[in-house]
Image: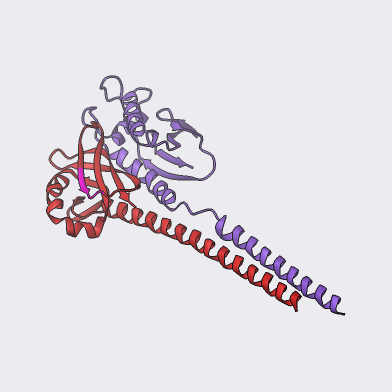
Chain colours: A red, B purple
Amino acid sequence: MFETIAILFIFFIIVLFGFIFYTRIQKTTYKAEQEEAVILRAIQIAEKASFLPEIQCSFDNVPVEDCIDKYKLEALTPIIDPNKIYYYRIFGDSRITINQTYPSDTVSWTLYDRPKEGERLSTQIPVSIYNPATDQYTFGVIYVEVYR
Amino acid sequence: MKSNKTQMEIMGLAIIVILVAMAMLFVVQFIVLKEPTELKKTYTYSELAANTLNAMLKTTTACKDQDITRLLQDCAAYPPDGLIVCNGGSCDFVTGAIKEILNQTLVTWNIAFNFTTKIKILDKEENVIPPISQGTCIGERQTKIYPIPTAAGPMIVRLDICG
């Protein structure tokens, strides 16, 4: 009888260890899935920023990829703030800046800025900045920082 | 008899412990130790080569307001200095411009890359401007190739993003 009790006792100890191990594994898997979701969201926001129709170049109503119209960008920047609720649905907690890199690296636009405390995921997307007045292109980079 | 029965029970328990340990080992091996997919890196690198090259080739320079594509065409058609003159020849100017763009982007972001401009002259491939690179390019890479027509034949502009 005592042997049976001892065996049952050991069996339940094994079941308990198994349960603890299972919850630990679930915790690790959940953290990994959360991390992946944050990264996917960062990629989504970066794609939306680089293809935003409000600032994308277009010729004869045909949008051009990897190109930002300088005058559209300058016109949109002051409009984003009063419409932050609308753009929050698109960009969430993030910061989007466009820097001109060549020929001059002193020009910069902050398109959207809604900071949050915590870690940031940064993405850089090279892009052409088109000046329709002079029909010239400069080299720029879109910096997208998504807050966790 | 009783001793045999007890031994059988203990052996059964030992087998269960071994099976549970093996199951835990498999779980640890295939779930916990599984390398996470580098989603962001895959996405960023796949877009980076194409975006960088497309934007760079369209860029207008201070050399008689010619874009980088035009300067490369001039350099390829009229080696070694090119026909367009601005603070030296078009070849030197465009090399400097491309280096400056890549320094401010890929070099600053610590990304290994290899940039080449090649043209075929008499069945021999030659560089239009000296190749520009950073780091070693072994293993996986994302490549963007841009063919540009020139008076001396088609020129292949290639950017490899490595890692």
What secondary structure do most residues of the magenta stretch adopt?
Answer: strand
Which image quarter: residue A100?
top left
Residue placed at 22% from the left, 46% from the top?
Answer: A68
Instruction: Find out whether residue A114 is within the magenta segment.
Output: yes
List x then y, in percent, for residue A97: 24, 43
Residue placed at 44% from the left, 30% from the top?
Answer: B131
Question: In screen coordinates, is A13 left or right of B126?
Answer: right
Question: Vertical placement of A44 versus B101: above or below?
Answer: below
List x then y, in percent, for residue A146: 31, 50
List x then y, in percent, for residue A118: 33, 48
Which image quarter: residue B72?
top left
Residue range of the region highlighted in magenta in the rendering: A110-115
Residue placed at 46% from the left, 61% from the top?
Answer: A30
Instruction: Find out whether residue B97 is within the magenta segment.
Output: no
Q: Is residue B122 visible?
A: no
Residue A134 vs residue A42, the one in the foreground: A42
Question: Vertical placement of A94 versus B138: above or below?
Answer: below
Question: Vertical placement of A134 versus B129: above or below?
Answer: below
Residue B137 vs residue A33, the one in the foreground: A33
List x then y, in percent, for residue A110: 20, 43
For the image, the number of numbered tags is 0
Residue placed at 38% from the left, 45% from the top?
Answer: B48
